[in-house]
Image (spheres, rainbow, N blue to C red):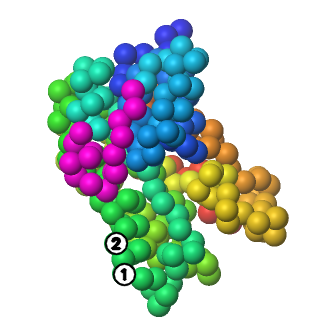
Amino acid sequence: MSPRLAGKVALITGAGMGMGREASILFASEGACIVVADIDRAAAAETVALVTRTGGEAVAAIGDVAVESDVEHMIDEGVRRFGALHVLYNNAGVLWKDRDRSVLETDGTWWDRVMAINLKSVFWVTKYGIPHLRAAGGGSIILIGSVSALAGFTRAQDAYTAAKGALIALNKSLAIQFAKDGIRSNVIHPGIVETPLQAPYLSDELRAEFKTAIPLGRIGQPRDIAHAALFLASDESSFMTGTEMIIDGGFMAQ
């Protein structure tokens, strides 16, 4: 059986750690060449090393996903190296619980930065990436939303929630606009996932609270999200666009 992503090139933002790194390794194991897009040069280099160590191909593309010129450069770097682009995995995001709180408490500067990384970055990635997907004859756009966009929470993170909610609407627009080009767009809504970004906030008390609240009885792992993304990146999801996948251990089903 052929690898599920044989012959495909995937740009993964925020690929230096957490869910992005896990997806890079998994996608490469299924035959994809990986453009490891990240602001942290050392972290990106480590992901590239992990991919190549297992026999895959990857290139580091360094920049800030919130900056137009950086995104244009990262995409150009990937296309120069691998000759095409088939998957735009918009994984990069920030979750700053100490700075992003209720609208009554959040500073405007932090609001803008959260929006720039979690929402505007998708604008830049799709603006410069979609022409390459068109040239390749189609492809897959994957957006990382959040269950925070689907329900209100007492621990407010209003900039994060607003950005993730906006991705739902943008996803539908992308799906309809570019279906004629064979380009699909779908959203993954993770629940709580144990990543380096989340780790500082996951006290023993909070871990116990989450495990009790999640029907499957555990916090998600990066690989749980990476496997969902692999399905969306592959041709197995070729009749799926404009939709949302909830990967949360059953939390939203309650």
- Type of residue at label 2? Asp
Q: Is residue 165 visible?
A: no
The quadrant holding residue 179 is top left
Q: Residue 232 in the image: x percent, y percent? A: 45, 36
Q: Which residue is mark 2?
A: 112
| Image disc number at residue 155 | none
Q: Measuring 62% from the left and 52% from the top, which residue is drawn there?
A: 196
Task: Tell me the element at label 1.
Answer: helix
Question: Looking at this view, is 250 or 102 the one in front?
Answer: 102
**What residue does disc 1 label?**
108
Label 1 neighbour load within 10 Å: few <14, some 14-19, many 20+: few
- Between 200 and 167, the residue placed more toward the observer is 200
> Circles 2 and 1: CB distance less than 8 Å?
yes
Residue lying furthest front: 42
Q: Please report the residue visible at 57 percent of the width from the left and 75 percent of the height from the top.
A: 98
Residue at the (82%, 64%) spot, across then down: 204
Q: Position of residue 124 (x, y in %)?
A: 25, 51
